[in-house]
Amino acid sequence: MSTATPEATPEATPTPQPPLGTLLIISGPAGVGKDTVWRAAGSCLPTFSKATTCTTRAQRPGEEHGVHYFFVSDEEFDQLIANDQLIEWAHVHNARYGVPAAQVLERLIQGDDVVCVIDVQGARRIKALFPQALLIFLKPPAGRETDVLRDRMAERGTTDDEEVRRRLDSAQWELSQTDFYDHEIINDEIFHAARQLCEIVAREKSKRADVAEH
């Protein structure tokens, strides 16, 4: 009497996962024009979306909640920390700033490119978590750092003299941290700086793609 042998069930072919997206970090002292340069570069970096940062600082005229920042109270920020919802956070200029995990992790896993426009403290923490992140430091013109930063902060019309002094003091330390970054860009003219940013990112993405293929 023969016994029928059950047919082997073919194994399911695993769905290939997309490669992780590129994480771009743009840092620099207050007043150097980080967001301005990023916006100017947006048209030549169409695959990147900006991670919106949470902050406890006051909302400035012209800023939109959920677009420029998520403006939250100290209590809400404490809750984000307690729930482990921030990739990194730091005290900067008398306020707290943090990058929501969902703004970065979900997009990178899906293969999307993400940019974080953050302070030096935050950049260091994110680099520790994501060693492959591309870090770019935006600098004011050499020899005129203090004047340029002071003038640009004054143009905002939302920062008092004491806050300007505090941010200029912080800028001295931030400008000493450039060795930690992959590239530096001098923002002497917005569109020139934006063009440099686009060229650097395109070059780095191409280089990393070549490495991944081999």
Image (spheres, rainbow, N blue to C red):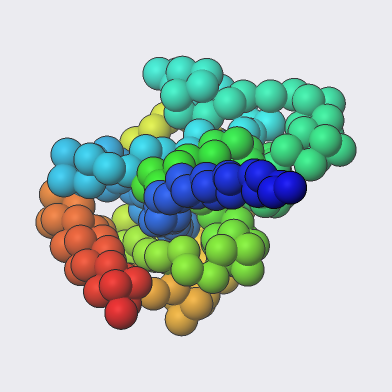
| Vertical comparison of 118 with 53: above or below | below
In depth, the one of 24 and 102 nearer the eye is: 102
What x and y, as percent, mark residue 185? 28, 66
Total number of numbered labels? 0
For this orientation, the residue located farthest to the front is 1
Is residue 73 visible to the viewer in this orientation of the structure?
yes
What x and y, as percent, mark residue 52? 50, 34
Q: Residue at x 28, y 68 (%)?
A: 209
Q: In this view, does 146 lie to the left or right of 168?
A: left
What x and y, as percent, mark residue 75? 83, 26
Q: Which residue is drawn at 46% across and 64% down?
A: 133
Q: Which residue is drawn at 14% across and 56% down?
A: 195
What x and y, as percent, mark residue 101? 63, 41
In depth, the one of 133 and 95 nearer the eye is: 133
Q: For the C terminus, which image quadrant?
A: bottom left
In depth, the one of 151 and 189 nearer the eye is: 189
Q: In this view, does 47 lie to the left or right of 192?
A: right
Q: In this view, does 42 lie to the left or right of 96?
A: left
Q: In this view, does 174 lie to the left or right of 114?
A: right
Q: In which quarter of the image is residue 27?
A: bottom left
Q: In which quarter of the image is residue 55?
A: top right
Q: Quadrant of residue 131?
A: bottom right
Is residue 115 visible to the viewer in this orientation of the structure?
no
Q: Residue at x 37, y 38 (%)?
A: 49
| Vertical comparison of 178 with 106: above or below | below
